[in-house]
Every structure is written in C-alpha cells, then in structure tokens.
C-alpha cells in the first residue's frame, strides 16, 4: 500500500498516444485522475472534434469492460487503485478506422505464496512458489531463509538451491531436503519500479521414518490382536471342554494354528 501515492503521478504526466502518426493526424490524449478515495478515473480524449464517433470500448487483457454507443470525444473508466486495478487498459473510439489509446495503471507488486506452508520428505526436492499479479510485472525476485537474527539471501545455483522466476511467478527448489538445515521459514521478495512486497512460506521436512509410522502401526495392531485372540482362546478352552466336547475340538485346532502363526511371524 505504501507505494500507491506514486500511481497518482501519471495524472500530472499527460501521456500522448498516437504521436507516431503524421503530425496532422488526430490524437488521443490519455490521463489518470484520482476520483474518490481508492479509485482512479482513466480518460481518453480525442483531440480532433470533427471526427464522427459512434461509440466507445474499454478493453483490458482482451476483455471488454465497458461499452457504449455515444458520440462524446471523451471516454472515461473508473478503476480501483492498487494491484486489482493495475494493468494495461485500451480505449477504443468507434471511428472509421477505429482509433485506440493505451493507459497503463501501475502498482507495486502484490506478492503472495501459492501455499503458506509446504512439506517435503527428507531427501526429496522441496518446491516453494510465490506469485504477483500486479502491473508492471516484477523486475527482480529474491529469496531468503528467515532466521531470528537475519534474512539469509539464497543464491541461485549455490548449495542445493535452484530459482526460476518470471514476471508474475518465482519458484525456489531445494534439492536433497535436510531436516536440520532446511526446515523453517522462507521469504520471497518481489520488486518493480513502484515498490517491493514479500510473502513468507513455512517449510516442514519430514523424516523418512515418519512415512513408515502408519505402516508400523498397522503391524503392531495386528500383532496385538493376534495375541489377544490367542490368549482368549487358550483361557476359554478349559471351561468349554467339559460342556461341549464336539464344539471344542475345532476351536482347539484353530488355537493351535494361531499359535504357530504367531511364532512364525515373530521368528521372521
Ligand atoms: C479529458 O477530459 C476530462 C474531462 O474534461 C479531463 O478531466 C481530463 O483531464 C482530460 N484528459 C486529457 C488527457 O486531456
Ligand atoms: C468510482 O467507483 C467508486 C467505487 O465503486 C465510487 O465510489 C466512485 O463514486 C466512482 N467514481 C466515479 C467518478 O464514478
Ligand atoms: C505501457 O506499458 C507498456 C509495457 O510496459 C509500455 O511498452 C508502454 O510504452 C506503456 N505505455 C504508456 C502509454 O505508458
Ligand atoms: C538459475 O540458474 C538456472 C540454471 O543455472 C537458470 O536456468 C535460471 O534461469 C536461473 N534463475 C534465475 C532466477 O536467474
Ligand atoms: C503470468 O501468468 C499467466 C498465467 O497465470 C501467464 O499466462 C503469463 O504468461 C504470465 N506473464 C508473465 C509476464 O510471466
Ligand atoms: C526486498 O528486496 C528489495 C530490493 O532488493 C529490498 O530493498 C527490500 O529491503 C527487500 N525487502 C525485504 C523485506 O527484505
């Protein structure tokens, strides 16, 4: 938010578009003015009053934002200040041929993490990603490892760090994750002409053994269950033998085979 004041500067600098055309050619002059707090008014004014106009169109990123069929030589658009409204706006006068101008609305980067916390297994590659959507794109991205005392810069290609960056995204890969060294907070920092902003991501590194815990748990559970069944069957046997001789016989052999199973598992 701190760099927003700069956006109003272009209001003073009236940018003249279409200068490349011959001197006598009609021109579109553009300006940005602060309207109410938090919003900007973009203007495209056609300087030649004799041109027949049959409408206007405001376009951003290929999308038509506003359209009319009026004849005014002045067209305006209300946009929000800051990263949401930042971008390149095209104003189009429906003339023959169509005449258009370009208005750049700038803002500091709006940096955010894809995921505020990431995790990886020891030995794997960890991937942390930050993005920024504002205009103009980020000129320089930087990554830091955050400690209590300082932000340690991470240099591409050193240690196990690989950094890939573009105007709206940066990716830090950490190879061969190490629990002791790599777990902690990382900061990505994006800078353009209008300011700088950062975001923090927490990286958790899990030990290889941790991935085995659920499996070990199941093995232990099965062993306990088998033991309980075994003890239960053994205790039940003396009671049942006098009551029902026929029923006890299969139970006895079951118990015996359980006993063998346990012994085999334990010895293997
Ligand atoms: C365009 O016209 C509007 C309304 O008269 C004015 O406020 C604005 O400053 C003009 N912009 C330029 C670039 O002439
Ligand atoms: C621009 O939009 C804001 C918010 O929608 C509104 O408060 C303001 O009055 C609008 N300004 C103009 C000049 O239309
Ligand atoms: C708008 O931004 C683009 C890209 O950064 C640049 O090429 C162009 O000259 C700018 N136009 C104006 C009118 O500022
Ligand atoms: C980091 O280094 C790799 C390979 O050396 C390269 O492809 C990549 O563009 C570099 N990234 C940055 C941000 O300079
Ligand atoms: C920004 O991100 C979009 C996808 O979200 C991509 O298509 C575009 O090429 C990116 N722009 C830059 C300058 O990297
Ligand atoms: C981000 O990087 C810029 C430019 O390198 C620097 O001025 C700024 O202090 C950094 N911000 C943080 C929080 O480190």
Image: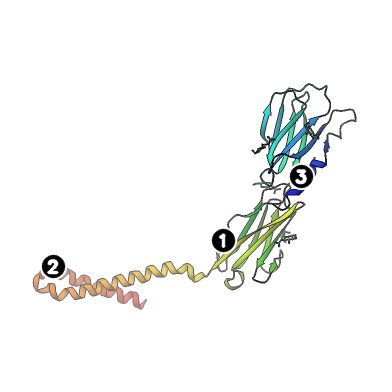
Q: Is residue 15 left or right of residue 55?
A: right
Q: Quadrant of residue 84?
A: top right
Mark nearest the camera among 1 and 3 is 3
Q: Quadrant of residue 47?
A: top right
Residue at left 75%, top 41%?
A: 104
Q: Helix or strand or loop: what does disc 3 sit on? A: helix
Q: Residues within 10 Å of mark 1 (few under 14, many from 20)?
A: some
Q: Is residue 262 left or right of residue 176?
A: left
Q: Is residue 87 above or below residue 59?
A: below
Q: Helix or strand or loop: what does disc 1 sit on? A: strand
Q: Is residue 235 left or right of residue 194?
A: left
Q: Of the two numbered discs 1 and 2 on the same chain, state the one appearing first in sequence.
A: 1
Q: Helix or strand or loop: what does disc 2 sit on? A: helix
**Residue hosting label 2:** 247
Determine whether label 1 and label 3 are within 8 Å by CB: no
Q: Of the two numbered discs 3 and 2 on the same chain, state the one appearing first in sequence.
A: 3
Q: Nearer the viewer, residue 201 or 214?
A: 201
Q: Is residue 167 above or below residue 54?
A: below
**Residue hosting label 3:** 8
Q: Residue furthest bottom?
A: 267
Q: Nearer the viewer, residue 202 or 78?
A: 78
- Compute the Cα span from label 1 to label 3: 38 Å
């Amino acid at each position: 938010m701190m760099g927003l004041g700069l956006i109003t500067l272009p209001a003073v600098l009236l940018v003249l578009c279409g200068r490349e055309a011959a001197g006598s050619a009609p021109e579109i002059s553009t300006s940005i003015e602060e309207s109410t707090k938090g919003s900007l008014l973009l203007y495209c004014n056609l300087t030649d009053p004799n041109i027949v106009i049959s409408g206007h169109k405001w376009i951003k990123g290929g999308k038509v934002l506003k359209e009319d069929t009026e004849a005014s030589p002045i067209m305006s658009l209300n946009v929000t200040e800051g990263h949401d409204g930042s971008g390149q706006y095209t104003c189009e006068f429906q003339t023959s041929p169509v005449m258009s101008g370009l208005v750049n609305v700038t803002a500091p980067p709006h940096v955010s993490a894809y995921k505020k916390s990431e995790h990886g297994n020891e030995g794997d590659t960890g991937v942390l990603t930050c993005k920024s959507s504002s205009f103009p794109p980020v000129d320089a991205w930087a990554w830091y490892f955050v400690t209590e005392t300082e932000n340690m810069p991470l240099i591409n290609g050193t240690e196990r760090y690989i950094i890939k960056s573009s105007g709206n995204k940066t990716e830090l890969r950490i190879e061969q994750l190490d629990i002791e060294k790599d777990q902690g907070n990382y900061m990505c920092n994006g800078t353009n002409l209008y300011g700088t902003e950062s975001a923090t991501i927490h990286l958790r590194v899990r030990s290889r053994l941790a991935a085995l815990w659920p499996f070990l748990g199941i093995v232990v559970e099965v062993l306990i269950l088998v033991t309980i069944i075994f003890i239960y069957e053994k205790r039940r046997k003396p009671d049942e033998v006098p009551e029902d001789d026929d029923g006890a016989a299969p139970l006895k052999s079951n118990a015996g085979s359980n006993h063998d199973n346990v012994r085999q598992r334990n010895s293997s």
